[in-house]
Image: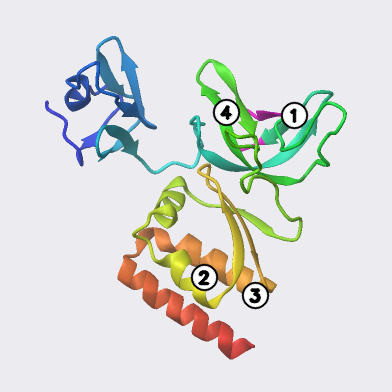
Amino acid sequence: MLIKVGDIVMPGDIVDEISRVKTETKCILGPGLRRYSENVIVCKSGIMRKKNPNTFWVDSHQRRYIPVRGESVVGVIVNKSVEIFKVDIGASEFASLAYTSFEGATKKNRPDVKLGDVIFAKLKVASMDMEPELECVDSRGKQAGMGVVADDGFLFSCSINVVRKILSPKCPLLKTLGREVPHEIAIGMNGKVWLKARSPRETIALMNAILAVEYISNEETIEMCAKIVKSLKRCT
């Protein structure tokens, strides 16, 4: 059976469209796809997606995060040793984060990170055969918004689908609410979101809006945002 973009796929299916891509053409395989020999095999059920020119992935509803190199994640420090921190990112095993993976950090100048701290980081290593490894610097060694987030925010979990939707340029949620409800937010591709608004009431309202956006259209999202803003103004 010929699999096309938009089709429902199952583990073991061969994606002919990707397999036919010439070897000299760069082809990026995202979550749900693996290359075996000359074929590209589906490794989880979902909907086949494509982003031009040649980026493919399987869009599926999942809560267990599968680490992908280069993705940004939100995690919690759960252990620390002489050289590394252990971070819970919601995957099947903890990720490691070296003390030197922070801007300006050295073996003598260690970052002030404690157990229970929430961090926003990027996956440096993600492989089926290796432990996930994080870093809090970009390619130039700069912080670039990563690191330990403020301890007075609120951390909650949502589905991977919600994260993909609110990060989409087409989703009006964050842009619409951001104009009326100032807030700070760190969104991890692992389904973890850290949020801080001006008050607990606003923080909870924003969290509920994020959790509700998964099953509604963009038009319904705009209507929901208007109701939230009106309700918050009435309570002030």
Given the current orientation, which residue lies at the most extreme top position? 37
What is the three-letter code of the residue carrying label 3? Arg
Q: Residue furthest front?
A: 140
According to the image, label 3 marks what residue? 201
Tell me the quarter of the image containing the N terminus: top left
Whether residue 7 is in magenta: the answer is no
The residue beneath circle 2 is 178
Which sits earlier in the primary sequence, circle 1 or circle 4? 1
Distance CA(mark 1)–CA(mark 4)? 13 Å
What residue is rendered at 33% in x and 66% in y?
Answer: 218
Q: Say what amino acid the circle numbered 2 marks.
A: Gly
- Span shown in magenta: 88-99
- When asked about the image quadrant of residue 236, the answer is bottom right
Q: Which residue is mark 4?
A: 124
**Which of the 4 quarters of the picture holds residue 214?**
bottom left
Q: CA distance from mark 4 to mark 3?
A: 36 Å
Compare marks 4 and 2 and give the one earlier in the sequence: 4
Label 4 vs label 3, nearer the camera: 4
Q: Amino acid at mark 4?
A: Lys
Q: Is residue 91 at all visible to an observer of this figure? A: no
Q: Earlier in the sequence, mark 1 or mark 2?
A: 1
Tell me the SS state at disc 2: helix
Q: Which of labels 3 and 1 is toward the front?
A: 1
Residue 82 vs residue 55: left or right? right
